[in-house]
Image (tube, grey):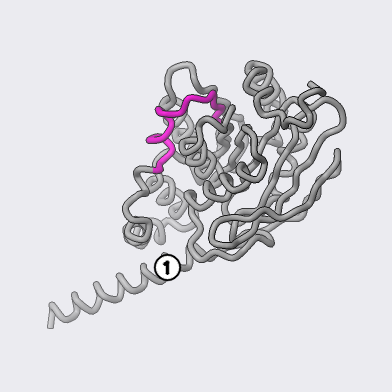
Amino acid sequence: MFWIVVVVLTGGYLAATLAMTYLVHRLPRRPVVDRPDWGETLDTWVPTRGGGRLELWRIVPAGPVRGTVVMIHGWSRNRDRMVARARHFARQGMITVLFSARDHGRSSRFRFMNAVEFAEDALAVMDWLGHPVILYGHSAGAGGAIIAASRRPEQVALLFLEACYTDSREGLLSLYRWFNPVFGRVFGPMILNWMNLLYRFQMKAVSPERLAPRLPMPAMVIHGAEDRRFPVAFARRLHQAFPEGRARLLVVPGAGHSGSSEHPQYAGAVADFLAAHPGACAATIPPAHRDWA
């Protein structure tokens, strides 16, 4: 009788965590509405693999163009979520390209989105643009940005990682514990075992701290000091994972997971980092705008 109870409980736990693995890929979705209000905006669709498509804005600022930045939103959001950040880059003369990843916004549905799929969507946007870019990612989008940069280092001149995790498994466990301590500790580890099986045991290989040492482009790691989803210790570890002198760290006092760009320090730090790498920025100017610079 004891072993029957053990088998039933174990089977129930495995079935429940398998169902939860599906649900955490589907929920929640919290799109926002924030339309670009500067420059010349192209509102279009970009094809992605599998016959899907991504909604995209390409916003050209008034005046000389200094480069192009592709911005990747975080989990559950959409392209509108990056508009406030894009304004800071527009003030620096940057063309900003904002898209909604698959299964977000109005982009094509996709059953099992993850950081690798975010990276695939970023690569599709880069293919559509046809020239090198600056990549900026927030949260899950930061994970996608560093994966995309590792796969196409020759096409990424600069890399911005805001509110990023270090290890895929550790980051998701932290996120689940933030959501609910019981859920994170009781169900989280098995959910991640199912995910690792689903992703063909690649979770560790695509962890940002594993990819950072091989990246040739300068990077800026931005993190809120009060981030409760991904603690600031993640940012310090990620910064140290880059080759010495390759990355700059900005820890924003008082900011949470998504509030760094609202702090007065943010705009100046971004401007300083861009100014420190004028050649990299110039490499991302589209051919049609190179005579402006």
**Rendering coords of residue 258 (x, y %):** 62, 43
Residue drawn at x 70%, y 45% is 98
Left or right: where does residue 177 sit relative to residue 77? left
Location of residue 66 in the rendering, given as x and y in whole percent from the top left corner: 74, 25
**Total numbered labels:** 1
Q: Quadrant of the C terminus?
A: top right
Q: Residue at x 38, y 45 (%)?
A: 170
Residue 140 visible, this angle: yes
Image quarter (top left, top right, bottom left or bottom right) of the N terminus? bottom left
Q: Residue, x 34% and y 62% (percent of image)?
A: 194
Helix, strand, or loop for circle 1? helix
Q: Is residue 62 magenta?
A: no
Q: Nearer the viewer, residue 41 or 128?
A: 128
Amino acid type at circle 1 is Met
Q: Position of residue 49 (x, y in %)?
A: 55, 56
Q: Which residues are magenta?
A: 206-221
Mark 1: give few (<14), some (14-19) or many (20+) Cα within 10 Å: some
Q: Is residue 222 visible?
A: no
Which picture quadrant has residue 211?
top left
Left or right, 285 with reference to 192: right
Residue 207, by quadrant, is top left
Q: According to the image, label 1 marks what residue?
A: 20
Q: Is residue 65 above or below residue 96?
A: above
Horizontal side of 135 relative to 211 (left or right) equals right
Q: In the rendering, at what x and y percent does residue 225 appear?
A: 55, 33
Asked if residue 1 is positioned above or below residue 33 in the image, the reply reads below
Residue name at image x 56 percent, y 37 percent? 226
